[in-house]
Image (tube, rainbow, N blue to C red):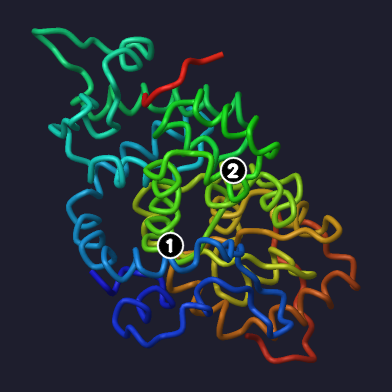
Amino acid sequence: KLSQIAPDTKKALENPAYSFKDLFETDGLGLGLSSPHLNPRAISFVRDYIDRNGKSLMTLKDWARPVFNMIDGIFVQHNLPRELKYLAVIESRLNPSSISGAGAGGPWQFMPATATRMGLKVNKSIDERSNYVKSTEAAAKYLTELYSIFDDWLLVIAAYNSGPGNVMRAIKKSGSRNFWEIQYYLPEESRNHVKKFIGTHYIFEGQGGLTTLTRSESDDHYGNNGNFTLTRNISSDEAIDAVTVTVRGKYNAGVIAQLIEMNIMDFNRYNPGFDKVIATANNSYELKLPSGKMESFNSRKNQILSESVNAMLNGATSSNEPAAVSPKLPARNITSGRL
């Protein structure tokens, strides 16, 4: 449903004339808000992809919620970003019966050899690639393996499609480990696969994130603390309802929680280590809040930032309890080939 889409994405889907630059560029208001950049070489592809697929993918979201919940739970156990679940969307639209012309099967589109290597049974009498839970466990293992090789989520997604050998050869030929530099040394299907993943991420999340950036872009945007996003202690239903915005500046967890009227313990579940990460020089935080609370945050962000600065000056440093709010302001070696 369009009502479940992040506001900027909703505008883009409802009104083709809406400027997608607002969806892909950082906030320029000087209020400490920003979002991960979409690489300029992807904007045209992603814009067209959202135009063509946005509404149909949102209908998928309605019936796929139990599947997404299951994937989220398994990925959290494997310390993987939940957003990698969108890889199964572009692989198969979550269809467990899907079989490609090349013989890849199941929601995660495993080839038989890779499926077997990841612990799935694939023979004449049983094909566990079609089992949502078992195939997701296998996908988590394979994604972890690929990340240990490439240390970059865009390269992982490219390798998931074309095989790590092809990505390794593209790296060698290009002399780069940046996806945007090596993409034309990859098969066309693989480079488009990565862009489809990014587009799907934008449709469901309303912005980019850790898994839509190169390693260098991620380091520039998140510093060395990008993995804090993996430790959120929220349910899948909470994650689906939540909205995310990246903040920079002297924000304080206690001030935010008090002014948006959110229990500090709940705030910390959604945003672990907030004060520690945001206090790091030139760092940012991917703030996640329930949709209603995010509306409150956006409507009061000027006051929240001012009160956060006051709290810092007054010595409030812990997010374990609300910070004092100033009374002066009103409350507010793997072989090549596809899988």
Q: Is residue 183 left or right of residue 292?
A: right
**Which residue is depicted at the point 45% across and 55% down?**
198
Q: Mark 2, residues whose alpha carbon is within 10 Å: few (<14), some, or many (≥20)?
A: many
Residue 16 image position (x, y, % from top left): 33, 83
Reading the image, the residue beneath label 2 is 182
**Helix, strand or loop for disc 1:** helix
Q: Do the residues labelled 1 and 2 touch (CB within 8 Å)?
A: no
Callout in the foreground (1, 2): 2
Quarter of the image for residue 329 reads: bottom right
Give the quarter of the image for residue 173: top right
Side of 282 relative to 49 (left or right): right
Q: Quadrant of the C terminus?
A: top left
Name the side, left or right, on which 300 lies relative to 312: left
For the point 17% across and 52% down, which residue is it?
63
In this image, 165 relative to 258: left or right?
left
The mark that comes first in sequence, 1 or 2, is 2
- Residue 118 location, x and y as percent? 38, 14
Residue occupied by mark 1 = 202
